[in-house]
Amino acid sequence: MNKAHFFTIELARHDQNASGEEHLHRLIAMDKVFYTDSRQFIDPSLLKNLTVGDKIYVGTHRLKDGTYWIHWIYNEAKGILEPKSAYINPLVTLLKLPLSLSLIAISIYAFLRLFESDINIWIILLLFILLAIPLAVGCWLLFSSIHKLFVKINRTMRNILWGLENIKQGKRSFCLPVDSTLLDKSSQTLCLPQAESGSDLDNIHPADLAQLDEISLCTLRGNITHVRAQRGFTGSGNSRRDYVDYAFSFRQNPLLFRAGFSTILEDFNPVFYRQHPFFLAENDTVNLVIDKNNHRILGIYNEEDGSAYLKISGLATSYQQLKNIYIAMGLSCLCAFIMVSGIALYEVWQQDGLLNKLVWMKEADTFIFFVITMFLIFSGIMLIIELLSLLIRKYSLNASRIVFARQILQLLKRHRNKSNHIQEIL
């Protein structure tokens, strides 16, 4: 899935996402589906000029659902479409690291010194606000630099850029025909998309069958027209949620589907993508899974590209969401671990105890106590979350509806020999 793939394709269909999100493109050739974002390219004009029947060479990596993300495109008549990541300068990026670390270190040191001062509380608050600016700039520079370095050293990206250089030199034999069978070189077996992992949170329970009349879902098939998208958000600060509202006409009825997204993940380089953004184009043939009680769309299966989207709402939690919570909690504990380590080292330095064994032993005892406490807190929180998730799954009618909608989408995908992967939309 993470490997680079190179294809020679004759374009059978080229679509842009709904009006308002036109930067996302979908290319279809035979049974292969490709996605890309025009914002990742230096000059995206070639992408807009591609027409049905064009023979193009593409450098891609595979996504979870068996589709591909395009990183570069070459057409003999129209030229080459290069990604911005091809021109990342590692030397400049490395030079930004000490600058960002210096800003962060100076800001943190100033914060710690303020705690020891006897200045008026209002002046301290004002200085805190002022010091937050260089700290934020330093964190942004550090994140940007590390991100670019990871892109540059990423094995998949190096292979993709290798293909780009070969294309520039006129070598094209490494680009496979789009109808060729992908083989794993080590085992010479077919590389098929893997099935989704089973979980009690995502599977139908015997008790769910007794609630079929209350669950009341229906599936409708048809073409969508007059598709448009509009971005918005709810809440503010840490509770802010960004979304894109997709409004479209289905069987002459106006419908709305809200797809949440993360602005932070959107800034990541596409080489780290494991699934494509929500995509809905004019005249796509779709199957909608609708809750008959409130006429709300729970799932969408797009027959044009084989993508399936499941709307997770309310208190319902999926297995994938639970995995994401574990990752988020783990990263939070890691950040806390790094901060406490820094404070402990600062305390040792303040006491001139770099060579004092007793000072180190005292700080080590404090540090071990903190690690054990963090582990117990982490375990306790995750135990509560897992228990609540299972209880909600067992007693919530909404959670049962979402599970049935997932099963319907998977049946639709299997009927057309697609992978079981379902993209979850918040």
Image (cartoon, helix red, strand yellow):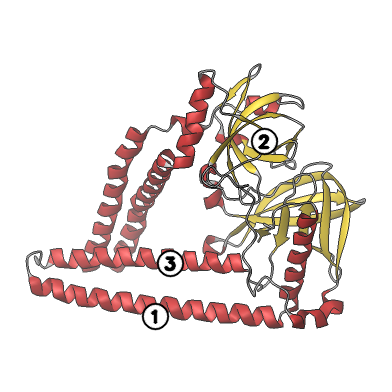
Left/right placement of residue 318 relative to residue 360 reads: right
Q: Position of residue 293 (x, y in %)?
A: 85, 71
Query: Helix, strand or loop at disc 1?
Result: helix
Q: Are marks 1 and 3 in contact (CB under 8 Å)?
A: no
Q: Position of residue 186 (x, y in %)?
A: 51, 45
Which residue in the structure is indicated by mark 2?
Answer: 180
Q: Residue furthest right?
A: 252
Left/right placement of residue 402 relative to residue 6 reads: right
Q: Which mark is residue 410?
A: none
Q: CA distance from mark 2 to mark 3?
A: 41 Å
Which residue in the structure is indicated by mark 1?
Answer: 376
Left/right placement of residue 352 relative to residue 398 reads: left
Q: CA distance from mark 1 to mark 3?
A: 13 Å
Mark positioned earlier in the residue sequence (1 or 3): 3
Q: Residue at x 66, y 51 (%)?
A: 65
Q: Is residue 103 above or below residue 29?
A: below
Q: Residue at x 46, y 68 (%)?
A: 329
Give the residue type at disc 3: Gly
Q: Which mark is residue 330?
A: 3
